[in-house]
Amino acid sequence: MALNPTHEMHKRRFGRNLGVALLLGAFVALVFALTVVKVTRGDPMQGYDHVVQPEAVPGATAPAEGGTP
């Protein structure tokens, strides 16, 4: 049983798949590069824990230690 020659449709599909794969790889590389830059800069990263953070409120000052707000 002989193998069928590649149809023209398969060649076009391969070209599109290759283009999508390259774009996906470029996107992954961009996200990785941005992550590496953010981590190596050493900026403090704060997560959002649903609590008001005085340093994040413009014009507000933090309450004194041990005092009432």
Image (cartoon, rainbow, N blue to C red):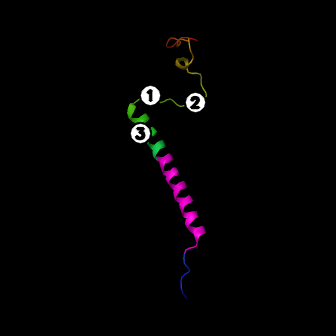
Residue 36, numbered circle: 3
Read off the residue under disc 1: 44
Q: Residues within 10 Å of mark 2 (few under 14, many from 20)?
A: few
State whether residue 61 is above or below residue 51: above
Residue in front for this viewpoint, 7 or 52: 7
Main SS category, magenta section: helix
Q: From mark 2 to mark 3, how far is it between C-alphas?
A: 24 Å
| Magenta highlight range | 6-28
How crowded is the residue under tag 1: few (<14 C-alpha within 10 Å), some, or many (20+)? few
Residue that numbered label 2 is attached to: 49
Relative to 35, say whether 46 is above or below. above
In the rendered image, which quarter is residue 8 located in? Answer: bottom right
Q: Nearer the viewer, residue 61 or 6?
A: 6
Image quarter (top left, top right, bottom left or bottom right) of the N terminus = bottom right
- Kindly identify the residue that appears in the image at 50 percent across and 29 percent down: 46
Residue 10 percent coordinates (x, y): 58, 68
Residue visible at 54% across and 86% down in the picture: 2
Which amino acid is tagged 2? Asp
